Amino acid sequence: MAALVLMSQVANAETVQVKYHGAVLLDSFACSEVNEGSDVTRICYDKAERYMVIRLKTVYYHYCEIDSATVQGLLGAGSKRQFFVTRIKGNGTDGPFDCRTHPIPKKYRG
């Protein structure tokens, strides 16, 4: 019976395609749907790995070494888009949590 439950959990595990990175399994993430009318539509965070995946409209992006206080600020912001742009998003070549200059957690490397 336990094997059946485990197989069911694995079968239901969600994987998303992250732009510029590839497939990411969301089984270790806490995800929140966003319904505020902006292009931020979903926020998923793996606190243990300090790794966030965010869906902007229909495309997922990832952010590395992002602390839980920043993610909580994003989740609680009146305008998640404004918070994202001013506190998280980089300038195209770098940013405070840009995975090009901050390491991707080992468990999420392709």
Image (tube, grey):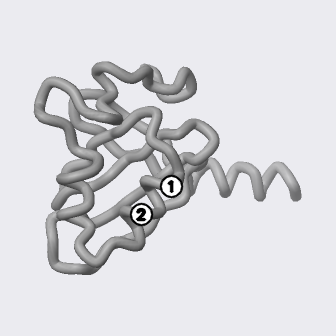
Q: What separation in Å lies between label 2 and label 1 (alpha carbons)?
A: 6 Å
Identify which residue is drawn at 28% across, 78% down: 78
Q: Secondary structure at mark 1?
A: helix
Q: Nearer the viewer, residue 6 or 77?
A: 77
Q: Note whether 11 is above or below 38 in the view shown.
A: above
Identified by mark 2, the residue type is Gly
Name the quadrant of the C terminus.
top left
What is the residue that sits farthest to the left in this orientation? 92
Query: Dot 2: few (<14), some (14–19), or many (≥20) neighbours within 10 Å?
Result: some
Q: Is residue 42 left or right of residue 106?
A: left
Q: Is residue 31 left or right of residue 94?
A: right
Residue 7: give its label: none
- Give how far across and how far down residue 28 sits, in percent: 60, 47
Identify which residue is drawn at 56% across, 26% down: 107
Identify which residue is drawn at 46% across, 34% down: 65
Q: Contact (CB < 8 A) between labels 2 and 1?
A: yes
Identified by mark 1, the residue type is Ala
Q: Is residue 32 left or right of residue 3?
A: left
- Give how far across and how far down residue 68 sits, in percent: 53, 51
- Give how far across and how far down residue 19 sits, in percent: 22, 36
Q: Secondary structure at mark 2?
A: helix
Q: Is residue 63 left or right of residue 41?
A: right
Q: Note whether 19 is above or below 109 in the view shown.
A: below
Count of numbered marks: 2
Residue 73: give its label: 2
Q: Note whether 85 is above or below 62 in the view shown.
A: below
Query: Dot 1: few (<14), some (14–19), or many (≥20) neighbours within 10 Å?
Result: few
Name the quadrant of the N terminus.
bottom right
- Residue assigned mark 1: 69
